[in-house]
Amino acid sequence: MSVRLKLTLSYAGFVMVAGVLLLAAVWVFLLQYVPDDWDRRMLHENPNRQLLVHTFAPAAVTVMAFLLVFGLMGGWFLAGRMLAPLSQITIATRMATNGSLSHRTQLPGRRDEFRELADAFDMMLAQLEAHMAEQRRFAANASHELRTPLATSKALLDVARADPNHDTAEVIERLHAVNTRAINLTEALLLLSRANQGSFIREPVDLSLLVEETTETLLPLAEEHGVTLVTSGDITPTTGSQALLLQLTTNLVHNAIVHNLPEKGMVWINSSTHPDAVILTVENTGEKLDPELVSALTEPFQRGTERIHADDAGVGLGLAIVKTITQAHEGTLTLIPRPDGGMRITVTLPTGVPTLMGMGPDFSVPILW
């Protein structure tokens, strides 16, 4: 049975029960004042209970039949009015099932349970639409980025095949560089997918130690670019995946080194502890950035300047990976352009996060930027 039919039968049953109780109350009340004396008195002088039953029963049956019809018709009408909002939600659900996520119920009227359900459903559709648009955009960008090294490799091979006397060592060197970039991009995409799942073992992590390890690893790169690294901060305990948080720190520092002044650049790295959060701040000098551009840098394959073709240029996923890892650790990421040029990036992580079971402790990620 449909919900409307169930509600109709419930309304009709309630009306019938109420009618029976009412008639029963009237009957019991009347019986207290009607004598049960069939033999000694005449019917026209003093009616008795038998006469009352004979007279009252047909009227009671008529009333109950009327209440039954009234309950069914009224219940059907009221149930239809009450369940009308569900029809709009059902239509929106079917359209969403067919792939149309732009439709909204926009239920009018005062705020009640159905209105709250419709608003929550509209919010879910909006989030799904935004997520699907982001996924389509990411897939298109990833396809474009992966096609570039493949097309370059094909062109190099075509040139080598067309000219047998061409220097094969140069072709091999260029193919090695192109393939390395393609591998880095593929591994970065895999890391982004894993971090986005948020299923990993959480363990105590000291961000200050990760900052120290990252600084030692990237110090040669900083010296090559003429950038000075300045670290500060105390012990910064938090919980999470040490591998992912190391990747986060490495991406931030590497990004700050590469996108800096041509000479005498600076990078400041600070880790601090607060009562309910730990904060990692990476700040660098560099070109002045538009705030609108800065807000879009966490999108995949977005770059703050023109595309760089150096060996340490990265694959355009550095800050996107940082954002995903931060969200997986229930933290927040803030990007602010510096007035004098460069950018200030702040990662805020909670101090206490419950342990989640997922990836094993042997989970490891490559160092990608």
Image (spheres, grey):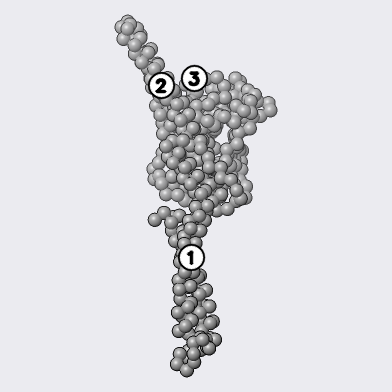
* Residue at 57 percent of width and 29 percent of height: 296
- Would residue 245 be seen by someone viewing this image from the given angle? no
**Circle 2 SS class:** helix
* Residue at 64 percent of width and 28 percent of height: 291
* Residue at 42 percent of width and 19 percent of height: 148
Reading the image, the residue beneath label 2 is: 147
The numbered dot on residue 183 is none
Viewer-proximal residue, 5 or 304?
A: 5
**x, y (%) of residue 131?**
49, 36
Number of residues whose C-alpha sits closer than 10 Å to that of mark 1, classed few (under 14), some (14–19) or many (20 or more): few
| Disc 2 and disc 3 in contact, CB within 8 angstroms | no
Reading the image, the residue beneath label 1 is: 66
Q: Amino acid at mark 2?
A: Arg
* Residue at 45 percent of width and 92 percent of height: 39
For residue 168, what is the image quadrant? top left
Picture layout, residue 3 above or below residue 164: below
Q: Earlier in the sequence, mark 2 or mark 1?
A: 1
Q: Earlier in the sequence, mark 3 or mark 1?
A: 1
**x, y (%) of residue 56?**
48, 77
Q: Nearer the viewer, mark 3 or mark 1?
A: 1
**Extreme residue toward the bottom, this view:** 40
The numbered dot on residue 310 is 3
**Extreme residue toward the right, this view:** 339
Q: Amino acid at mark 3?
A: Ala
Q: Earlier in the sequence, mark 2 or mark 3?
A: 2
Marks 2 and 1 sit apart, C-alpha to C-alpha, by: 77 Å
**Circle 1 SS class:** helix
